[in-house]
Structure formats: C-alpha cells, structure tokens
Image (tube, helix red, strand yellow):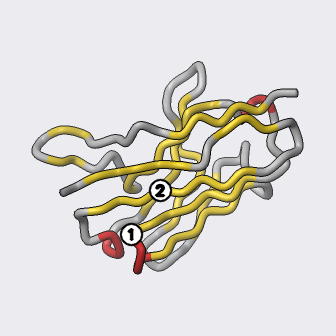
Amino acid sequence: QVQLVESGGGLVQPGGSLRLSCQFSGIAFSMYGMGWYRQGSEKRELVAAISRSSTKNYADSVKGRFTISRDNAKNSVFLDMSSLKPEDTAVYFCNTDPGPFVFMGNPLWGQGAQVTVSS
C-alpha cells in the first residue's frame, strides 16, 4: 500500500525547535529525491530537498535553521527545525522532489503536520 504519513508537528515558542518525520511506504524510496513542503496562507512551497545521493538544498527563508535528512532503510525523511519564527507557521508535507508523487493518476499527499510558532 502506498502511503505518506507525516508526524511531529506542534505548538512551539519563537526560537524553539521541532523535528518532523515522514514515512513513505509502498515505493522504492531510495530511488526518489524527497522534499518537505509547507503551506501557510499562500501556496504550497518547497522548503527543503534531499536527493537520492543525499545532496541537500534549502529555501533561502529556512537556510541555516532547518536540516533535512533521510533513512532509506526506514523509508523515512526528517526535518529538524530550529530558531523557529512565527512566519514558519504552516502545515508541513513531505513528498517526492520533484513532486508530487502520482499514484493511480492522482497526486498523492499525506495529511501534513501542523507547525505553529507562537508565544
């Protein structure tokens, strides 16, 4: 069964840290680049990506604060977020990069992980 499940969101104060996890089952995970996307009040944007060979890229808005990693043995990708700001508040999704993954003709997204940065 092809399934995307994100976890680890929550409420955190400005300057705090969170770790998001994503398990993408049912695919040849190691063959795909993976990314973390977020959607706040505007359109969904890619904030961090990791290639099949673990080359990493980040949006300027999160560079130096977020770290993406992957564990192919567990079909998982992670996002370590630190020095969080209120503008990081969003629903975070993982997916392939480029994405989204298409399953049976439709784009596949998980339920996402809500991250709220507020005092």
Instruction: Specify whether 10 is left or right of 73.
Output: right
Instruction: Specify whether 117 is left or right of 115.
Output: right
Q: Earlier in the sequence, mark 2 or mark 1?
A: 2
The residue drawn where x is 68% and y is 62% is 67
Residue kind at label 1, given as amino acid type: Asn
Q: Verify CB contact (< 8 Å) between mark 2 and mark 1.
A: no
Instruction: Specify whether 45 is left or right of 66.
Output: left
Q: Which residue is mark 1?
A: 75
**Vertical comparison of 45 with 56: above or below:** above
Q: Secondary structure at mark 1?
A: loop
Residue kind at label 2, given as amino acid type: Cys
Distance between the Cα atoms at labels 2 and 1? 8 Å
Query: Which residue is most to the left?
Result: 104
The residue drawn where x is 35% and y is 51% is 4
Q: Position of residue 48 (x, y in %)?
A: 58, 54
**Vertical comparison of 88 with 62: above or below:** above
Q: Can you say which quadrant of the picture contains the C terminus?
A: top right
The residue drawn where x is 62% and y is 57% is 79
Front residue (pair 9, 79): 9
Tag shown at residue 22: 2
Q: Position of residue 24 (x, y in %)?
A: 35, 59
